[in-house]
Image (cartoon, grey):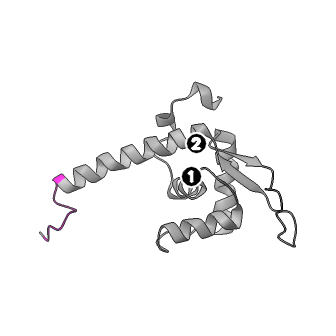
Amino acid sequence: MSPRKRSPESLLPLTQPVFGILLALEDKRVHGYGIMQALAEKTEGRQRLLPGSLYASIARMIEDGLVEEVAAPAGDSSGGPSRRYYRRTAFGKAVARAETERMQHLVKLAVSEKLLGGSSE
């Protein structure tokens, strides 16, 4: 089914690697190693991706229309084999937004249950 015929909510909940990749990509084109670095940096090392799970997740995400493979930016000179670059699609951004809203609701519930927010009970 094409991304245009699905609602973003139909893919929820996202796995941690998929959500992390969507966050790491922002609205830029990034190669695989750059995605791993960005996620580790953005989460202050709390979430890391290994290459196997990264590329398996990206393959599924391409099939689901969340990311797309794009051409390397002009002047990319890694010195080694050519890198594959990825970009979050508009549908991927909508799915990330829907997942964020889902998680936000859960955090509000956790706060109301005094599981978060300074309570030591």
Left or right of 96 on screen, residue 59: right
* Rendering coords of residue 20 (x, y %): 53, 58
Seen from the viewer's position, the closer of residues 9 and 87 is 87
At label 1, which amino acid type do we have? Leu
| Residue bearing mark 1 | 22
Residue 49, relative to residue 85: is it above or below?
Answer: below
Q: Which mark is residue 92?
A: 2
- Identify the magenta region: 112-120
Q: Earlier in the sequence, mark 2 or mark 1?
A: 1
> Would you say residue 49 is visible in this rendering?
no
Instruction: Give how far apart the Cα atoms at labels 2 and 1 are.
Output: 7 Å
* Rendering coords of residue 9 (x, y %): 46, 36
- Mark 1 crowd level (few <14, some 14–19, many ≥20, 10 Å Cα): many
Question: Which residue is outermost to the front?
Answer: 75
At label 2, which amino acid type do we have? Gly
Left or right of 7 on screen, residue 111: left
- Mark 2 crowd level (few <14, some 14–19, many ≥20, 10 Å Cα): many
* Rendering coords of residue 111 (x, y %): 20, 56
Residue at image location 77% in from the left, 48% down from the top: 70
